Image (cartoon, coloured by chain):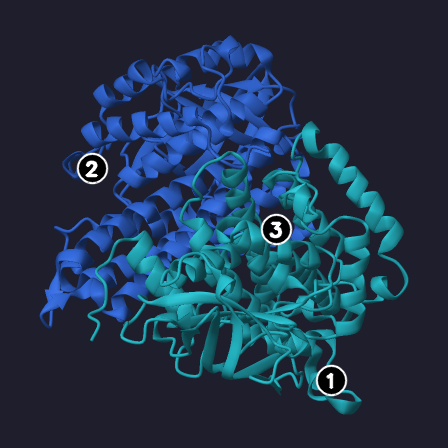
């Protein structure tokens, strides 16, 4: 039975936390949140070269370290805790995963080593103006001409789409949903517009394709199952990130409740505050259970269980993080409502990540469908 | 999620599954899932079931062989509880002795006490009741006022205990007493083993809100027990009692919560039959109920995995009770709503159906084993390190 973390995984957590304590301080987060680019290439390189975070779960044959999803989940809990401003979720949870799932060995061999080495920032361009994460939501079209493919249409709400070197684009051909790769450096007909985001710690872009050449990955029309599986993996990793963010918010609440005095004693000694903090921990531990069950299912490779656990994790962890982040502002009182205090950064990350991969209601319905309810 | 505990215990598990298939039949099978920590339903059948388990040598899987156990490890105990819940066997009538007193004696009792009391527990020959709570001391056990004084080679006990689960069946009580009359709070307490078959012990049933007599109040008037019946050191009863509650809050939650999962699945079937799944409001509550029981399961498995790996369980081991008790009450409300008008009607002699009984009894879950308010204090102070409330 492996439903607990190994010593190696504890060690990984310590290493990642120590790295982020140095390189993703509150000052870093605020600096990058205010920066339209929103990402520090120096830190990104360090993440790859010092601890190999981008390639952690990429198989060794593609230049990664070949660790499992539980290991990756440990990292996402920590990046969530630190509110890391980097295209890590987009690159690792979405793009690398989509490459691993698609049926195209040549593309994996070409594209994954750059991701693992920290040389390529990548993302998945799936959602369009309707903001849907399901198959019918994919409307952007691809057409084949003389053996090469061209994309025309618009993607939006694309995480870190403004700076990605590599776009994996879900598009519709006469055969059905297909996945394409676009390298942004040399793509004609590509327009990328950064979107001002409520959560400034994770940027998004709107991307317009006008007859843009693209590389088809795998077989035309068969991409949806691989994309659905990619979204399930990303749902679990986002849940781990959400649990980590919630835990950091509670830590801040507890630290404040221990020192802030009202009526002559620390507010944390009043049951009104103490019980609120206790309830926050109950939410966080439950969110961890939801996320960990997903990670374990991913490593076990049981597809039915993955689908159930992923939908459950997003349905629960999204709301848990938002609740805890909101309560954190409440515990801090007036100071928690200011721009200077970091509480709002967590609240905004929470509210945005709640809908990033589809709303909790959407994930409940995915769960219902998978349970036959 | 099928949990595989590894090849070492697979044979044990298979033997157990076969045994359930052969023995959980007839009247026992008709009482699948019946009972709970505060549910005295079908007492005689459940007692017979415990004796069936005893005859199969399935009680005390982890207890040493010299006391009648199987002499296996924590892993096998966990597998036993897991498979027990999976088989949906009746809730054990001897839970007080098996899950609380027994482990406490194994950890803190002296050799004579272990030899005297453990084998009859496993043989289901002696039943036990817990004498911790008092009218003035519910979750605040440091307020215990029941006094015990030495008289030669005996203790003489005076006081009143209450909320003793299954107390009317008890042959023996384990009682928290104040042995130092000048002591305050958690100092000067001693845990005593006390036979009920004597003139100084009067046990009166208390009907609970579901109409059953599974609680009792116990009046002790010059009740006597031997000087050798103190568990742990005299004056250190607080530590002994806390160890017992630690056991209660730990692994004993697993089978109960796997039972909640079964309730949630039954509720989905009911909702489907009634066409309630099309109602968006009910649909959301039903899915949240299913999510809750699934999270309870994972939380418990996390704790069990840590225990079997020889690690100290994390915070989830403490938060699990609060989450489960609160969410199970929501499940009960939902079940009653789905039952609709039929939920208003009971059988002859106030006989309740499964949903009614589960709903009503779930109201005890946020009280026993430390109320939810106490749980929040424990989490706040012991896990999060928040300052204690000022105490008078």
Cα separation, mark 1 vs mark 3, equals 30 Å
Q: Which residue is mark 1?
A: B342
Q: Is residue B69 above or below residue B88?
A: above
What tint does the image give chain B?
cyan
Q: Would you say B198 lies left or right of A122 here?
A: right
Q: Colour of chain A?
A: blue
Chain to which the residue tagged by mark 2 belongs? A
Image coordinates for residue A11, horizontal then vertical, percent: 36, 25
Which element is circle 3 on? helix
* Residue A367, numbered circle: 3
Q: Are marks 1 and 3 on the same chain?
A: no
* Circle 3 Cα neighbour tier, 10 Å, few/some/many (<14 / 14–19 / ≥20): many
On the image, numbered disc 2 is attached to which residue?
A29
Give coordinates of residue A196: x percent, y percent. 26, 43
**Visible in this render: residue A89?**
no
Depth check: A306 or B251 in front?
B251
Residue A284 in view here:
yes
């Amino acid at each position: 039975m492996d439903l607990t973390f190994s010593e190696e995984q504890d060690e990984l957590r310590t290493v990642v936390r120590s790295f982020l304590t140095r390189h993703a301080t509150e000052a870093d987060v605020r600096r990058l949140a205010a920066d339209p680019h929103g990402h520090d290439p120096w830190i990104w390189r360090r993440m790859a070269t010092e601890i190999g975070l981008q390639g952690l779960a990429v198989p060794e044959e593609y230049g990664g370290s070949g660790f499992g999803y539980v290991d990756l989940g440990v990292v996402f809990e920590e990046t969530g805790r630190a509110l890391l401003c980097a295209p890590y979720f987009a690159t690792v949870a979405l793009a690398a995963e989509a490459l691993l799932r698609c049926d195209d060995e040549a593309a994996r061999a070409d594209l994954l080593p750059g991701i693992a080495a920290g040389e390529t920032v990548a993302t998945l361009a799936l959602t369009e103006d309707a903001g849907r994460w399901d198959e019918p939501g994919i409307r952007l079209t691809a057409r084949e001409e003389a053996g090469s493919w061209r994309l025309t249409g618009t993607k939006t709400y694309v995480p870190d789409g403004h700076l990605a070197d590599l776009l994996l684009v879900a598009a519709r051909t006469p055969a059905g949903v297909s996945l394409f790769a676009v390298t942004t450096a040399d793509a004609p007909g590509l327009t990328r517009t950064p979107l001002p985001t409520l959560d400034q710690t994770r940027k998004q872009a709107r991307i317009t394709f006008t007859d843009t050449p693209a590389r088809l990955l795998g077989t035309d029309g068969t991409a949806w199952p691989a994309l659905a599986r990619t979204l399930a993996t990303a749902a679990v990793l986002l849940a781990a990130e959400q649990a980590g963010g919630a835990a950091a918010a509670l830590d801040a609440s507890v630290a404040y409740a221990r020192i802030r005095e009202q009526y002559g004693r620390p507010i944390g000694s009043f049951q009104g505050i103490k019980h609120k903090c206790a309830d926050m921990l109950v939410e966080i531990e439950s969110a961890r259970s939801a996320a960990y069950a997903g990670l374990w299912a991913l490593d076990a490779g049981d597809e039915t269980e993955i689908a159930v656990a992923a939908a459950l994790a997003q349905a629960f962890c999204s709301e848990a993080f938002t609740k805890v982040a909101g309560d954190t502002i409440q515990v801090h009182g007036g100071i928690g409502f200011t721009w200077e205090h970091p509480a709002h950064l967590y609240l905004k990350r929470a509210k945005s990540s709640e809908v990033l991969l589809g709303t909790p209601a959407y994930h409940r319905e995915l769960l219902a469908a998978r349970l036959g309810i | 999620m099928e949990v595989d505990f590894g090849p070492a215990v697979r044979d044990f598990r298979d033997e157990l599954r076969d045994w359930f298939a052969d023995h959980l039949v007839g009247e026992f099978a008709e009482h699948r899932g019946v009972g709970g920590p505060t549910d005295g339903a079908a007492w005689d059948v459940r007692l017979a079931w415990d004796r069936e388990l005893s005859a199969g040598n399935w009680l005390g899987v982890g207890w040493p062989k010299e006391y009648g156990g199987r002499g296996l490890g924590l892993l096998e105990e966990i597998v036993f509880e897991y498979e027990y819940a999976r088989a949906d066997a009746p809730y054990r009538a001897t839970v007080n002795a098996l899950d609380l007193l027994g482990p406490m004696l194994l950890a803190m009792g002296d050799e004579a006490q272990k030899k005297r009391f453990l084998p009859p527990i496993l043989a289901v020959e002696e039943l036990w009741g817990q004498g911790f709570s008092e009218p003035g001391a519910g979750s605040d056990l440091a307020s215990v006022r029941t006094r015990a004084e030495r008289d030669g080679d005996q203790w003489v006990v005076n006081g009143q205990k209450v909320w003793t689960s299954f107390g009317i069946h008890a042959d023996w009580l384990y009682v928290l007493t104040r042995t130092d009359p000048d002591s305050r709070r958690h100092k000067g307490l001693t845990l005593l083993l006390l036979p009920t078959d004597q003139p100084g012990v009067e046990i009166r049933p208390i009907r609970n809100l579901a109409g059953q007599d599974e609680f009792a109040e116990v009046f002790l008037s010059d009740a006597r027990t031997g000087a050798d019946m103190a568990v742990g050191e005299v004056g250190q009863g607080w530590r002994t009692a806390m160890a017992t509650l630690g056991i209660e809050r730990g692994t004993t939650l697993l089978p109960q919560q796997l039972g909640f999962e079964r309730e949630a699945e039954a509720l989905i079937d009911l909702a489907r039959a009634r066409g309630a799944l099309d109602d968006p409001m009910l649909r959301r509550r039903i899915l949240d109920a299913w999510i809750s029981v699934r999270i309870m399961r994972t939380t418990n498995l996390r704790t069990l995995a840590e225990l079997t790996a020889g690690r100290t369980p994390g915070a989830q081991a403490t938060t699990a009770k609060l989450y489960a008790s609160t969410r199970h009450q929501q499940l009960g409300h939902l079940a009653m709503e789905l039952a609709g008008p039929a939920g208003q009607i009971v059988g002859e002699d106030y006989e309740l159906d499964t949903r009614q009984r589960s709903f009503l009894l779930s109201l005890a879950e946020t009280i026993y084993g430390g109320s939810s308010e106490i749980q929040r204090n424990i989490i706040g102070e012991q896990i999060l390190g928040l300052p204690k409330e000022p105490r008078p």
